Image: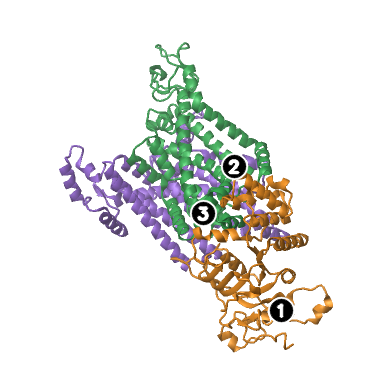
Chain colours: A purple, B green, C orange
């Protein structure tokens, strides 16, 4: 129990720090560089006096810490601010975008786990064979590939070209539509289309992580296969599938869960690029637009929200693993 | 990425540094390294890349007579689409002119020579990637050393800092910071270093923590050596091996990071060539659908470079026999 | 807590009074949640030329004691006087005399030498740190030290891993002797060596003691070594002194039940004698230093324990000359046997 409390307190601390820095970044620094919200709203031709008046109206001329405390208070009530540019509450902008991003990440995570675990396992079970080397190289290439490049390439190869009746330059005769080129369909309106439109983006996002996780699984399984407890099980006559499932699985699963918690943050970073290419109106898309439009309330809102999500995911992962692993529950020196 | 209590072992992120040995160690290291073909290839590739970026680029520009920012009106076909690799510029009749300029890797959106741009672009990529890593290593080394050596409250504070920093959605923050600070080489280096120092910090901290209990450190204290002397003379040499290994890994990450930033227009200022920017050029307004090479070539360059750094890191790690991974 | 001084006429080189060392342990949310009482009120003194053994089971605090004496740790309470100077809390700048006149020989021949430095650098480091002369002076002294500990000066440029365990320990001793110390604190210097190397190192330490008039604070758990090598003994248990005496006194007639049990547990190669001495079983493991028992720390395992042992910490009581013990119900003295 103490562990849970302690972990939650750490999470709260992290959230505070994230929000503080987000606030610091976009209000303090932006004001210093001459791009404060008041200036934005007042427009290019505004005089300093007018800007000051707007600032007063917006409440952005109050001391920084007052604004920050108000901001925190709003967050607790679920209010992430107000976008002066778009004239609507930030929450209204963020939530639908979050829905899109979450869908994409969810599909992606499923894809990459489904791909990485078998690949890692196969490589680990046939170490140093051709299969192993081949898979390892594939994983390495996957890790080295930038998402923002892979996405358009995949889109081109698997969506656009077939659509035009070609594949790798070779004519196919007819138009083949396996993957839609872009666009978003919500789950509620059409579940199959929802999935259909997320498969290719999800794949683009997933490939890099698949490489990482496949290597991780391989290394972990190889390590476990050498451990004494596996040898003991073997000597008692346990067959390999059983060993994998009962013993090694118990070690690998929690590690993967923890990694997933950590990687949500990385995924959110990468998801941005995928959203831009495939025209998915997710958080990344919203964030980048808000930065380019100097719509900082939205930016801070998105960063805060994402930070909360990341911290939440990491905390959940830690707690889940602790629930599975009795060693962690008691505080150790 | 966070440090969860007790999970370090499972994640393999506790770096155990067996105090490395002396002269014969170096010989063994070289032997192991030279036997690893993949790493040799990777190292060779990187050396060639470095040469290309520094002297190869101007040579290519001189040989072809094309500058990196020189726009060829006839470098685009009649529809305004860039040329594929191995093409001549389009003559007035709309057909390739065999006596005109020749583009080995084709042209880009503005009719510029892709090959020359690629070579010059390597400069930005390597400069920012390696530069940011150097800064990150420096910061991480300082903080990690202090945290691991002094322990106690100092360590607690620094470790919490590292964990929290890792919890940030770094890409978003980096974008925000870059947008606010503006684009440019130095700014990119600063931003990227700010979001990658915690990798070496954590590694160094764990290594120093493990080494601190060794009796030769106690012996040094019993002689009366000061803390910083001990850090410099007894601890630092043990750290060079893991640091080199992780440096290559971090460079790989930062190269992709930099490419991502330039892709969004937040890296080096145009028209300076940069691989990320070149990809962006090829992707915006869906240009890649009409001429895939514009995006494909810089992307492949990125993939191979990152691959090479990763492979080099793996090979060095095996040769040093350092355990643990960057995660 | 009496402090013995001026034994055999010499002023005490080292005198420790009421030394206490606690370690905070455990990870609470806002700090620590537990204390290890490693050393709880230890007093003794050491004269020039004396070899004092500190014996006890693992966890009794003897290593902590050694490190406090050399100020590798700062005592929580108590006083340490070295050569008449109070070094208990002294800042590093005032510890120069200590660093010069006292040195430590460590237990682990593998770990106590920096594997990346050559032997010459290792042995010379104290000299360079104390700026004890020019480069050639230091080189000469390093050669001298190497020969003194029985090593071939031609091997000075080698790395630790090129030496055997016993040789490495010699290097550690050479390093300790660099600045002509008066006191060597040896923390189980031979426990990690094989038997033949043990004998050689002990011989070396003995020869050095005679040649250089050294005093030793000798930490060990091996009573054979104590009998053959040391003058006086301090028996520790869970951070407290149980008994202190000369070696002859202790082995002839131990007063503390714990000492007797330790002696009885030492294997002797003669089966008849082993049978003859009977069993004074030392049952169980020592309790954790984090929660020591009330009263006498030994009472849960002591065959002679009574209620009083649970309630009162027995004080260290002198009994004729140099023999003291901390027990409410001590064994019979030599005189009454």
Instruction: Find residue B3 and name its label.
Output: none
Label 3 and label 1 in one chain: no
C168 lies above or below C222:
above
**In the image shown, does C210 or B296 lie closer to the viewer?**
C210
Report the residue marked by disc 2.
B314
Q: Quadrant of residue C55?
A: bottom right
Disc 1 element: helix
Report the residue marked by disc 3.
B227
**In the image shown, does A165 or A236 lie closer to the viewer?**
A236
Residue at the image position 58 percent from the left and 58 percent from the top: C100
Label 2 and label 1 in one chain: no
Report the residue marked by disc 1.
C249
Counting residues from the N terminus, which is met first, the one under dot 2 or under dot 3?
3
Chain on which label 1 sits: C
Chain on which label 3 sits: B
Q: Is C258 left, or right, of A276 in this rendering?
A: right
Position of residue C170 measured from the top left corner of the image (x, y, whole percent): 70, 56
Chain on which label 2 sits: B
Total residue callouts? 3
Residues marked 2 and 1 touching at CB (< 8 Å): no
Mark 3 nearby-residue class (10 Å; few <14, some 14–19, many ≥20): few
Q: Is C80 left, or right, of A222 in this rendering?
A: left
């Amino acid at each position: 129990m103490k562990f849970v409390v302690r972990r939650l307190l750490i999470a709260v601390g992290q959230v505070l720090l994230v929000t503080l820095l987000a606030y610091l970044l976009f209000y303090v620094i932006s004001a210093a560089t001459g791009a404060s919200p008041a200036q934005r709203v007042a427009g290019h031709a505004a005089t300093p006096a007018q800007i000051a008046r707007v600032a007063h109206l917006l409440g952005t001329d109050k001391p920084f810490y007052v604004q920050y405390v108000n901001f925190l208070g709003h967050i607790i009530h679920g209010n992430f601010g107000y976008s002066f540019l778009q004239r609507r509450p930030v929450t209204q902008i963020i939530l639908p975008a979050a829905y899109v991003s979450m869908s994409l990440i969810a599909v992606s995570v499923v894809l990459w786990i489904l791909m990485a675990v078998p690949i890692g396992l196969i490589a680990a079970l046939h170490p140093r064979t051709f299969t192993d080397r081949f898979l390892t190289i594939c994983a390495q290439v996957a890790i080295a590939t930038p998402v923002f490049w892979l996405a358009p390439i995949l889109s081109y190869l698997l969506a656009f070209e077939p659509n035009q009746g070609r594949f790798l330059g070779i004519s196919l005769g007819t138009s083949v539509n396996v993957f839609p080129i872009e666009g978003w369909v919500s789950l509620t309106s059409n579940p199959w289309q929802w999935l259909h439109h997320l498969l290719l983006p999800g794949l683009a996002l997933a490939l890099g992580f698949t490489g990482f996780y496949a290597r991780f699984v391989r290394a972990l399984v190889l390590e476990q296969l050498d451990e004494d407890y596996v040898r003991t099980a073997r000597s008692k006559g346990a067959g390999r599938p059983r060993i994998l499932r009962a013993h090694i699985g118990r070690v690998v699963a929690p590690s993967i869960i923890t990694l997933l918690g950590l990687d949500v943050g990385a995924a959110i970073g990468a998801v941005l690029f995928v959203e831009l290419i495939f025209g998915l109106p997710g958080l990344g898309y919203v964030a980048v637009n808000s930065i380019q439009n100097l719509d900082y309330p939205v930016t801070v809102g998105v960063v805060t929200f994402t930070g909360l999500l990341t911290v939440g995911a990491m905390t959940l992962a830690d707690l889940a693993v602790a629930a599975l692993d009795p060693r962690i529950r008691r505080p150790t020196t | 990425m966070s440090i969860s209590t007790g999970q370090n072992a499972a994640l393999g992120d506790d770096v155990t540094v067996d105090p490395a040995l002396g002269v014969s160690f170096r010989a063994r290291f070289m032997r192991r390294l030279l036997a690893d073909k993949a790493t040799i290839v990777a190292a060779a590739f990187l050396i060639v890349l470095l040469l290309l970026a520094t002297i190869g680029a101007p040579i290519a520009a001189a040989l072809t007579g094309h500058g990196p920012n020189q726009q060829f009106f006839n470098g685009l076909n009649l529809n305004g689409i860039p040329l594929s690799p191995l093409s001549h510029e389009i003559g007035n009749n709309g057909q390739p002119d065999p006596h005109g300029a020749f583009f080995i890797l084709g042209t880009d959106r503005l009719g510029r020579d892709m090959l020359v741009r690629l070579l010059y672009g390597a400069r930005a990529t390597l400069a920012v990637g390696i530069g940011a890593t150097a800064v990150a290593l420096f910061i991480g080394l300082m903080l990690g050393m202090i945290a691991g050596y002094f322990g106690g409250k100092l360590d607690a504070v620094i470790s919490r800092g590292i964990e929290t920093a890792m919890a940030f959605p770094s890409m978003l923050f980096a974008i925000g910071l870059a947008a606010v600070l503006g684009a440019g080489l130095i700014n990119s280096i600063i931003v990227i270093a700010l979001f990658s120092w915690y990798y070496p910090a954590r590694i160094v901290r764990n290594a120093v923590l493990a080494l601190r209990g060794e009796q030769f450190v106690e012996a040094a204290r019993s002689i009366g050596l000061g803390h910083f002397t001990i850090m410099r003379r007894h601890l630092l040499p043990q750290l060079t091996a893991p640091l080199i290994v992780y440096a290559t890994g971090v460079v790989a990450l930062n190269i992709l990071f930099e490419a991502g930033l330039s892709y969004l227009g937040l890296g080096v200022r145009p028209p300076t060539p940069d691989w990320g920017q070149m990809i962006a050029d090829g992707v915006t307004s869906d240009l890649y659908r009409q001429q895939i090479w514009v995006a494909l070539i810089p992307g492949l360059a990125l993939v191979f470079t990152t691959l090479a750094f990763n492979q080099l890191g793996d090979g060095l790690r095996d040769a040093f026999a350092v355990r643990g991974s960057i995660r | 807590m009496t402090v013995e001084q001026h034994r055999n006429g010499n002023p005490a080189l080292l005198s420790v009074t009421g030394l206490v060392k606690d370690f905070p342990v455990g990870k609470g949310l806002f700090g620590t949640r537990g204390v290890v009482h490693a050393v709880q009120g230890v007093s003794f003194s050491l004269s020039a030329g004396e070899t004092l053994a500190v014996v006890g089971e693992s966890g009794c605090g003897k290593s902590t004691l050694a490190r406090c004496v050399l100020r590798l740790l700062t005592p929580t309470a108590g006083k340490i006087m070295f050569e008449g100077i109070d070094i208990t809390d002294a800042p590093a700048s005032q510890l120069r005399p200590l660093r010069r006149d006292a040195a430590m020989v460590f237990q682990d021949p593998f770990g106590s030498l920096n594997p990346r430095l050559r032997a010459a650098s290792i042995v010379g480091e104290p000299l360079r740190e104390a700026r004890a002369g020019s480069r050639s002076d230091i080189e000469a002294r390093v050669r001298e030290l190497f020969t003194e500990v029985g090593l071939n000066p031609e091997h000075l440029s080698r790395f630790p891993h090129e030496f055997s365990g016993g040789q490495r320990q010699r290097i550690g001793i050479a390093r300790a002797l660099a600045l002509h110390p008066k006191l060597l604190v040896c923390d189980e210097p031979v426990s990690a060596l094989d038997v033949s190397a043990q004998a050689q190192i002990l011989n070396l330490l003995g020869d050095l003691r005679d040649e250089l008039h050294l005093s030793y604070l000798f930490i060990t758990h091996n009573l054979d070594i104590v009998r053959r090598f040391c003058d006086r003994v301090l028996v520790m248990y869970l951070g407290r002194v149980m008994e202190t005496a000369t070696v002859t006194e202790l082995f002839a007639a131990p007063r503390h039940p714990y000492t007797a049990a330790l002696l009885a547990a030492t294997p002797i190669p003669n089966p008849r004698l082993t049978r003859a001495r009977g069993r004074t079983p030392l049952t169980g493991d020592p309790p954790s230093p984090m929660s020591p028992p009330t009263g006498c720390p030994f009472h849960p395992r002591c065959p002679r324990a009574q209620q009083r042992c649970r309630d009162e910490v027995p004080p260290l009581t002198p009994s004729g000359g140099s023999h003291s013990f901390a027990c409410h119900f001590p064994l019979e003295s030599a005189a009454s046997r």
